Amino acid sequence: MKNDYFYEVERTYESIKGKIESRVQEFRKVWNNGDNKDIYCELAFCILTPQSKARSAWKAISDLRDSGILFIGTEEEILPYLNIVRFNKTKAKNLYILKTQMTNEKNEFITKDFFSKFESVVEMREWIVKNIRGMSYKEASHFLRNIGFGENLAILDRHILKNLVRLEVIKDIPKTVTPKIYKEIEEKMKKYCKDVNISMAHMDLILWYLEAKDIFK
C-alpha cells in the first residue's frame, strides 16, 4: 500500500504532526466548550466553502457573527458580507433558511442541542445532507470534522482526491462524485489510513497541507 509518494507524505507528516494534533484538539473543543451559536457558526461556515477559499468563508462568517447579522439578519442583510465568496446570492439564501431550521419558536438557537440528539455521526451526516440546503457529503463531513467528529469521515474535495490518486488509493478522480461513489472512496481511504497507521482526521489535514501549505479548518 505504501508507494514512493507515501514516504513524501510521511516525512511531511512527521514534521508537522504536533501542529496537526493541536488543530484536531481545537476541533474537539468547539463541541465540548462551545454553545448553540458556536456550533451554528461552524455549520454556516461550511455552507460558504463550496468553490470558495476557506479563509474567505471564515472571514465572512466572523464578520457576520461580530455584526450580529448572522443571527438576526434577513437574506438581504446577509448578502453584502458574502462578496468574498462565490455564489453569494445562493449562499445568502441558504444561510437564511439555515437560521430558520436552527432556531426554535422563541428565536433561540438550538444547533448543539439538536445535533446532540443523534445516536451516531453517520446519522448526523445523513440528516444534514437530506435537510440542509447547500450541503453535500463533503460539506457535512467538513462541518462534523470541525466540531470534533471527523475521525472516520472523509472530506473529499479536489485536493484530497488528487492526493488519493497519487497514493494509489483510487485509480482516478471521478467526473461526478455521487453519494455512492463518495462512500466507496471514503471506505477505501479509511482502510488505507488503518494500513499506514495515520488517522483519517490527520490524513485529511496532511493532504490539505501538501496542497495549500496551511493547516486551517
Image (cartoon, rainbow, N blue to C red):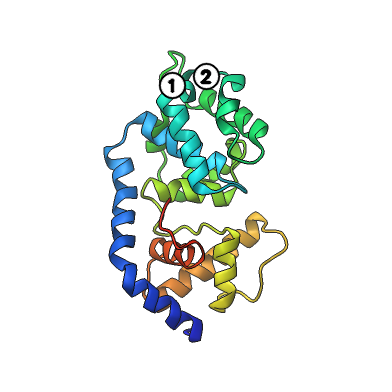
The image position of residue 103, as x and y in percent, is: 46, 22
Residue that appears at 43% across and 28% down: 65
The image position of residue 188, as x and y in percent, is: 53, 70
210 left or right of 165?
A: left
The image position of residue 24, as x and y in percent, is: 33, 55
Q: Amino acid at mark 2?
A: Gly
194 left or right of 80?
A: left
Specify which label sits upstream in the sequence, 2 or 1. 1
Residue that appears at 63% across and 28% down: 93
The answer to which image quadrant residue 116 occupies is top left
Residue 150 vertical position relative to residue 161 in the rendered view, above or below: above
Few, some or many residues within 10 Å of mark 2 (<14, 14–19, 20+)? some
Residue that appears at 56% across and 52% down: 138
| Residue designated by label 1 | 68
The image position of residue 180, as x and y in percent, is: 64, 59
The answer to which image quadrant residue 20 occupies is bottom left
Q: Are marks 2 and 1 in contact (CB under 8 Å)?
A: yes
Residue that appears at 46% across and 14% down: 105
Q: Amino acid at mark 1?
A: Gly
> Mark on residue 73?
2
Q: Secondary structure at mark 2?
A: loop
Res. 131 visible in picture: yes
Q: How many marks?
A: 2
The foreground one among 193 and 119 is 193
